[in-house]
Image (tube, rainbow, N blue to C red):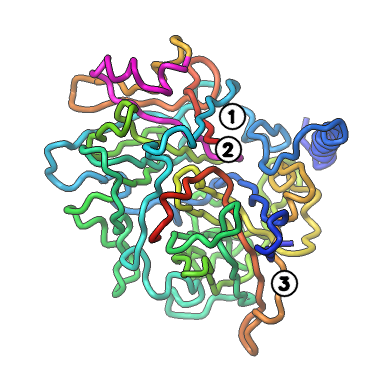
Amino acid sequence: MTKIDTNRPETVLPTPSHTVGPFYGHALPFPGGGDIAPVGHPDTITLQGYVLDGAGDPLPDAFVELWGPDPDGNVPQVDGSMRRDPASGGFLGRNGVEFTGWGRVQTDTDGHWTARTLRPGARGRNAPYLSVCVFARGLLVHLYTRIYLPGDEAALAADPLLSRVEETRRGTLIAEDRGDGTLRFDIRLQGEGETVFLEYR
Amino acid sequence: MTLTQADIDQEIATRHAAYEKGIADGAPVEHQPRRDYAPYRSSVLRHPKQPPVAIDVSKDPELVELSSPAFGERDITEIDNDLTRQHHGEPIGERITVSGRLLDREGRPIRGQLVEIWQANSAGRYAHQREQHDAPLDPNFTGVGRTLTDDDGHYHFTTIQPGPYPWRQHLNAWRPAHIHFSLFGTAFTQRLVTQMYFPSDPLFPYDPIIQSVTDDAARQRLVATYDHGLSVPEFSLGYVWDIVLDGPHATWMEEGR
């Protein structure tokens, strides 16, 4: 039964998740999906990484969504991530000025993704981080993780989540400074070096 | 050795029986599929083996995951929710209307959030380059739509009844007809991607993807209901499908939204 009577709370039960399947590529990704930072913004960070399976093979059919606050730690409430063109029915791209905080990037055929966004500010007792949601063919329920930024060891050590994660796995949540202006964050779905995934309750 | 439908049926039955036994023994109902569901072979190397680390959202109102990205009128065009009007000609197939409400676990409407759909055409073919099924493409149908929920949480699409299609996981593997849905809530923790099915599809028992939801009642929540009142005279058949987002969210953030 899929007409839900909201006067009967016991019937309000969650809709199950399903995989995105292999054929979302003409539907979900959009031009400029990873260009989250306003053009020329001085606090821009560039992220890149691979999504890998349990055999260490890259996934050519995954996508990630990134969601984070602005450099002052404020959560944006700005729309316009996927502006549409009413004339052509196509995409206009972001306007290059406003910061929506959200982006979606698919892996390329090498399993590699990149995104440019603003360096997130800290919120509360948390070290600065970006929230990540991973989707792929074969993944029946999406996975959440976080990208913490390297550098501020004191903030990382005090972070409520990181301080609960075992030492050997903590590094999977912290991007690596490549020294070339980019931060690398690989997502390993299974096996050696498996990324720490999160569940919210 | 070729993997047959009988092999997959056996695996599905084994998983289902184990789940039913667990319930009989007092295990909790599982509303969601397990990520580790071998009858769907693509899941084998793509699920984590370590348990997730749990975060209690009630302990920290500053979590960025308690908010969600905003979408607005700029992010959709007027005909994005009518998949039959996106080309010069009429798509082939049976026109349908798909409508419902987007709700949270308390049954409250989720307003102004983005709903994205995608699907195969009436012959069971996606407008995707990698799709190798040799059913015909329809030059008048892309199978992609978007809309924003209204103040009551309603969404509304006009589209074409998608066809079932073969997918080669095993010999004679067929997916029941479905429409993919992507949904956002008021919190990023409520994110959902799923598939909507049509009533009484004979392919349900054979499909390891729908069967990955091992709870019988939960699986039924993926199936739309035919609604004659939603059918449009001389135009389309109506299906209603209400969606409930799982995942915690913070009630104090919803004021004014």
- Disc 3 or 1, which lies upstream in sequence? 1
Evaluate whether residue B140 shows in this view.
no
In front: label 3 or label 1? 3
Can residue B36 be spotted in the picture? yes
Kind of element beneath mark 3? strand
Going by the numbered disc 1, the residue's amino acid type is His
Circles 1 and 2: CB atoms closer than 8 Å: yes
> Residue A114 occupies which quadrant of the picture?
top left
**How many discs mark residues in the rendered view?**
3
Q: Distance between the residues labelled 1 and 2?
A: 7 Å
The secondary structure type at the circle numbered 1 is loop
Residue A47, quarter of the rendered image: top left
Disc 2 designates what residue? A139
**Residue B97 location, x and y as percent?**
60, 75
Is A64 placed left or right of A53 in the picture?
left
Q: What residue is pinned by disc 1?
A: B47
Report whether A163 appears left or right of B208. Answer: left
**Point 29% across, 49% down: residue:** A76
* Amino acid bearing label 3: Tyr
> Pointer 3: what residue?
B226
- Outermost residue on the bottom side: it is B234
Give me the residue at 77% from left, 53% from top: B204
How far apart marks 3 and 2 lie (CA) works out to: 29 Å
Say which of A55 and A142 sits in front: A142
Check the picture and name the quadrant holding the C terminus of chain A. Answer: top right
Going 67% across and 44% down the picture, which residue do you hit?
A: B168
The chain to which mark 2 is attached is A
Give the answer, above or below, for where B112 lies relative to A134: below
Pick the quarter of the image with the N terminus of chain A.
Answer: bottom right
Q: Which of B52 and A190 is in front in this view?
A: B52
Q: Report x, y in % for residue B48.
A: 57, 26
Q: Are marks 3 and 2 on the same chain?
A: no
